[in-house]
Image (spheres, rainbow, N blue to C red):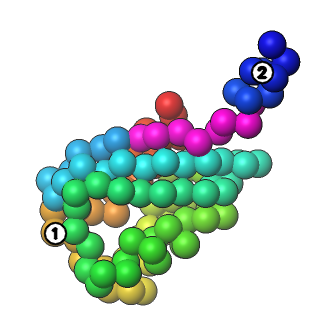
Amino acid sequence: MPFLKALNVESKTKQGIHKSKGGLIRSFVTVEKGNIKDIEISGDFFLFPEEALFKILEQLKGTQANREEIQKSIERIYEKERIQSPGTLPSDFTESIMKALEA
């Protein structure tokens, strides 16, 4: 039994799903000491330029795991990289991530 307990403690990645007008957004988030340690986002949404998703993910690593900081971080990278996402807003990504954090 101790092995199973240890296994459960190590498993901190949570999933959140949010449906935007532009498509489904699925987030897998690992938090450590109140900050996003690792994050993956997938779905059937579109982002331009092509590397925009990678830039968003890199921006989010190390961000405090709360709605306000996540939203600000995504908005900053949208502006800096001039990201376009038809039917999907920065708040839609935030919502998917928050659903993961609250799971």
Residue segment shown in magenta:
9-16
Residue drawn at point x = 36 percent, y = 48 percent: 26
Task: For residue 76, say whether it is visible.
Answer: no
Residue 88: x %, y % from top left: 23, 61
Residue drawn at point x = 26 percent, y = 73 percent: 47
**Image side of residue 101 versus residue 95, left or right:** right
Distance from the alpha carbon under mark 2 to that under mark 1 = 44 Å
Q: Amino acid at mark 1?
A: Pro
Nearest to the observer: residue 46 or residue 84:
46
Q: Residue furthest right?
A: 2
> As displayed, is residue 51 above or below residue 68?
below
Residue drawn at point x = 22 percent, y = 61 percent: 45
Residue 68: x %, y % from top left: 51, 55
**Image side of residue 35 versus residue 58, left or right:** right
Q: Quadrant of the N terminus?
A: top right
Q: Residues within 10 Å of mark 2 (few under 14, many from 20)?
A: few
Q: Residues within 10 Å of mark 1 (few under 14, many from 20)?
A: few
Nearest to the observer: residue 44 or residue 69:
44
Nearest to the observer: residue 27 or residue 83:
27
Front disc: 2 or 1: 2
The residue wearing badge 2 is 5
**Image side of residue 87 versus residue 68, left or right:** left
Nearest to the observer: residue 99 or residue 15:
15
The residue wearing badge 1 is 86
Q: Amino acid at mark 2?
A: Lys
Residue 94: x %, y % from top left: 41, 54
Task: For residue 18, say whether it is visible.
Answer: yes
Residue drawn at point x = 61 percent, y = 65 percent: 61
Q: Secondary structure at mark 1?
A: loop
Residue 92: x %, y % from top left: 31, 54
